[in-house]
Image (cartoon, helix red, strand yellow):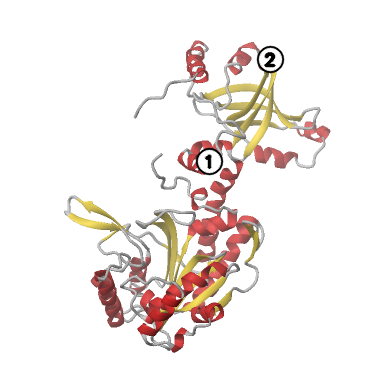
Amino acid sequence: MEEKLLNDQEIARREKLAKYAELGVDPYGQRYEVTHHAKEIRELCKDKTAEEIDALNLHVSVAGRIKFLRKMGKASFFNVLDKTGPIQVYIGIDVVGEKNYELFKLADVGDIVGVKGRVMTTRTGELTIRCEEFTHLTKCLHPLPEKFHGLTDIEERSRRRYLDLIMNEEARKVAFARPKVIRSMQEGLDAQGFVEVETSMLTYTNGGAAARPFITHHNTLDRDFFLRIALEINLKKLLVGGMERVYEINRVFRNEGMDANHNPEFTMFELYQAYTDLKGMGELIENLIRKAAKDVTGDTKINYQGKEIDFSQPFRWVKMNDLIKEKCGIDFSQITDFEEAKKLAEEHNIKLDKFKNTVGHVMNEFYEEFCQDDLIQPTFVYCYPIEVSPLTKKGPDPRFVERFELFVNGHELANAYTELNDPIDQKERFEAQLKAKELGDEEANEMDTDFVEALEYGMPPAGGIGMGVDRLVMLLTDQASIREVVLFPTMRDK
């Protein structure tokens, strides 16, 4: 990597390192005792007059990064940014002494410092710490980007997330909101007797979803492994083992395109519950999402990209075929001949891959082309063709399965099944997937003989659901791109 030439500001900052040594100060600091954060100080002083704040006699010790600095001879102002936000500091040579003020004069915007002092208000009413002791903690060797022009491009912000978090209050809000979403779901499930587990990311077979995998090689075993594309198979094996209610929130990997809603590495939430079905999964996920919205935003109605999304009302349930009839006037429940379905696809300018050679495949293409984008409010779309649901229990009409996808704002948020627990049927579904793979379907599942054997020991009737955590965080933080809610997203080369 070619070394960048330093600019004048960077040279000046490096030259100050020797001056810290002359003062006996380590430019890269030491332990520092923090007693308060900026938000806590503001809460303690909220709605109080200057006299009431003075009467508190509130002494604090804070640490953070200098975001604003105005040096004025023997007295100066600067802002310190900690994880909760900024707070103003006043420092005067008459209070801290000449030696400590000399140390302060070496400070630059971006340095990390500690401040001990008493909370007051300025004549303009700004809550301020009157510095009694200034501590240098870490030297910043680069000037920070300009507040309004320096770091606005999403590509650059994603590559240098550390700078994005320093400069962008919205980025900090999202970073702290994401774990709140996950914690809300964990609390909701734990209260219902679910057990959180961790399962292997390396798998022998590619299964659990329709996606292209990443392939890696284990040297000791001298064999290829897949990075998992879903959590499903191992969690179902735990149902066979008698755990009954399990969930996992963890990373999965899909070797496919990147856009505003897709990152090759993302966080999946999956749960499986014995002795329930698709309806039970709908009730469960609806309540979890409603709880998360309330916990993170304070309301069950949210604003997402200018649209109000209402999680407070019962989510709509509608069959896939009924949506297609509404949009296109075609009733796929009455069509059994592929050639008839293929002709309809041609008339509607739908191109079919050669492995999409059944009525169910055509039906799913119609749904994706004409119906998904209009599903703004939370909607459970159910009764899917069996061809696109290889792990799902059949419905009363064996051409369709007990599956739903939850759509919000035109995008899939969750996917649920009444789980297929018949090992003979499951093996036949895998065989159909292998035929699709031979015809060119790179997302088809592999034959998983170990999973079929597990089912032969008996898996109880069950429901299961999977949801992309990143997409839920996008909704609850009003972010249009997945890169805004993943701290370090996969990026193209510059």
Checking the image for residue 153, the label placed there is 1
Q: Nearer the viewer, residue 244 or 176?
A: 176
At 50% across and 60% down in the image, what residue appears? 186
Element at badge 2?
helix
Q: Dot 2, how many residues are within 10 Å of its Cα: few (below 14), some (14-19), or many (20+)?
A: some
Kind of residue at badge 2 = Ile
At 31% across and 59% down in the image, what residue appears? 213
**192 to the left or right of 389:** right
Kind of residue at badge 1 = Asp
Residue 292 picture location, percent across and down = 58, 61
Residue 178 picture location, percent across and down = 53, 52
Q: CA distance from mark 1 to mark 2?
A: 41 Å
Mark positioned earlier in the residue sequence (1 or 2): 2
Residue 183 picture location, percent across and down = 53, 56
Whether residue 75 is situated above or below residue 313 in the rendered picture: above
At 48% across and 46% down in the image, what residue appears? 487
Say if residue 417 shows up in the picture: no
Say if residue 125 shows up in the picture: yes
Q: Nearer the viewer, residue 329 or 183?
A: 329
- Quadrant placement of the N terminus: top left
Element at badge 1?
loop
Q: Dot 1, how many residues are within 10 Å of its Cα: few (below 14), some (14-19), or many (20+)?
A: few
**1 or 2: mark nearer the eye:** 1
- Quadrant placement of the C terminus: top left
Q: Quadrant for residue 457, please give it.
A: bottom left
Residue 98 picture location, percent across and down = 64, 11
To which residue does mark 2 refer? 93
At 23% across and 72% down in the image, what residue appears? 449
Q: Quadrant for residue 200, please give it.
A: bottom left
